[in-house]
Image: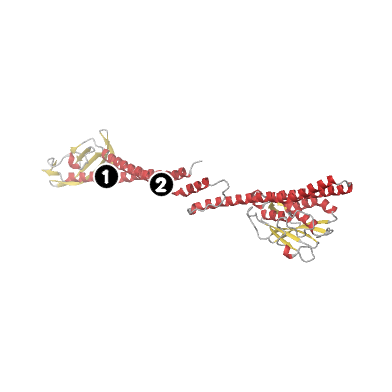
Amino acid sequence: MTSIRSRLLLWIGLPFTLVGLLTLVTSYYVLSRQITETFDGMLLNAAERLERRIYSVDGELRINMHYFSISTLGSRGDGKIFYRIRDAEGNMLAGFDGLDDPPGSLDEPLFYDTRYAGNTLRAVATTFPVVRSTHSDQIEVIVAESTEARENLINEFLLTLTILIALGGLLAVTIALLAIHRGLAPLRSISRSLRRRSQNDLEPIEAEVPREVSTLVASINGLMQRMRQSIYNTQQFNADVSHQLRTPLSEIRALAELAVRQPDAPRARHNLHEIGRIAESAGYMVQQLLTLAKARHELMDASAMTEINLAETCREACTEAISRIYQRGQELEFCAADEDSRILGDSVMLRWLVQNLIENASQHAGGSQPYRGTIYVAVCHCPDGMQLRVSDDGIGVRPQQLDRITERFYRASPETPGSGLGLAIVDEIARAHGASLAFDSPPGQGLTVTVTFPHTRPNGPTADPAR
């Protein structure tokens, strides 16, 4: 994986190199046109200067060679000059007869490329009138120059421009390196701060960072917060297990010692019966604690949820609980709407939710007396999504207790058996699914627990909807 520094240098250097090459290509065409126009102007000026050197004597055309030489044509001295002068009848007056004729008419000065004596030439051809005794005549003048001077001048300009672009590129890379070094300083500072921390230091990063880095810092702080919460949950779980199992284990040990010391067989059988009951209660407590640990909403991955049929999941949970409910002299009634009841969720956790709601109604609906009524489970649609309702015909819960019944180990009726974790597990599973949990207990009409699942995917495991 390449570093950020390398990527930044690449994305700075590559465009600059492309711009430099484009500049060189564009400059070549622009300079070629400008230099060609300048040199063509010099050639035309040299041809026009010949007009002043030609005169007529007794009807014959002559050239004043005393004032005219090749050097007067205006060459920079880097190339070769060729010229040709003819009259209207095609008679040579001066110059090089082997120069090619112009490719078109000479109504105006004509520039063209040609070759002569192994030289590549740029030529201009023009005509001007000359008076011969009693009549006027036209003189054709061709002046040509080899292209070495033009090419050398273009090369000099391009070489100079290339050097300037290279120096500018080196300067830009140097400035970019400095800017990258300074720009990445907050990341290096955060890295050093994290390396200096101990493995148990999960406090948020408190540092002044640029706006672009603040998102990264916020993500790291969020991760640390989730790690702290996870560690806290683990520690809390260990404390809960230790606290809740200490008492039943002590009772089991005391009853076992009494059973060994007492010779009375009926009394010993009673103690052994109590040992079995306490052991069963302790086993149920451990099972509920493990379920609570697995159902923590902070650990739930919302992206792993799948589309499930809520009614079918509730029917499976009722089927598993029906035999236990009948043994206790109770009835279980399940009702589901015929419409589509699909939601996004985890089927195993939702079965735990339904089973704990049924078990809570079965054990606590009657208060201090065993419940002998019916437990109702219903799935239906509502404007906010899908609703699951579990209700009973028991004594209900006092209004001042409704806000506490989802607390761990809290029981509205302490005289009834149970772990005090059932509704806490229901609350965690509901929060993990982005669902809301509501309780309703009119006086003397039992308790109704309503879980409302949203239509859309829940926001994630950290969502904490209003209950």
Residue 113, located in which quarter of the rendered image?
Answer: top left
Left or right position of 141 against 187: left
- x, y percentage for residue 58? 10, 43
The label nearer to you, 2 versus 1, is 2
Instruction: Judge whether residue 306 can be spotted in this image.
Output: no
Colour setup of the view: secondary structure
SS category of the residue bearing label 1:
strand
Q: Farthest residue toward the left? A: 58
Amino acid type, mark 1: Leu
Disc number for residue 110 = 1
Disc number for residue 209 = none
Residues 78 and 24: in front is 24
- x, y percentage for residue 43? 23, 43
Q: Check contact, mark 2 vs mark 1: CB within 8 A.
A: no
Give the position of the C terminus as an image quadrant. Answer: bottom right
Left or right position of 449 against 150: right
Instruction: Judge whether residue 428 can be spotted in this image.
Output: yes
Residue 443, located in which quarter of the rendered image?
Answer: bottom right
Q: Where is mark 2, residue-wise?
A: 178
Amino acid type, mark 2: Leu
The residue lying at 46 percent from left, 42 percent from top is 6
- x, y percentage for residue 326? 84, 53
Q: Farthest residue toward the bottom? A: 443
In the picture shown, does residue 78 fall above or below 217?
A: above
Spatial separation of the CA atoms under disc 2 and disc 1: 56 Å
The residue lying at 44 percent from left, 49 percent from top is 183
Left or right position of 252 against 201: right
Residue 423, located in which quarter of the rendered image?
Answer: bottom right
- x, y percentage for residue 334? 79, 56
N-terminal-most mark, 2 or 1: 1
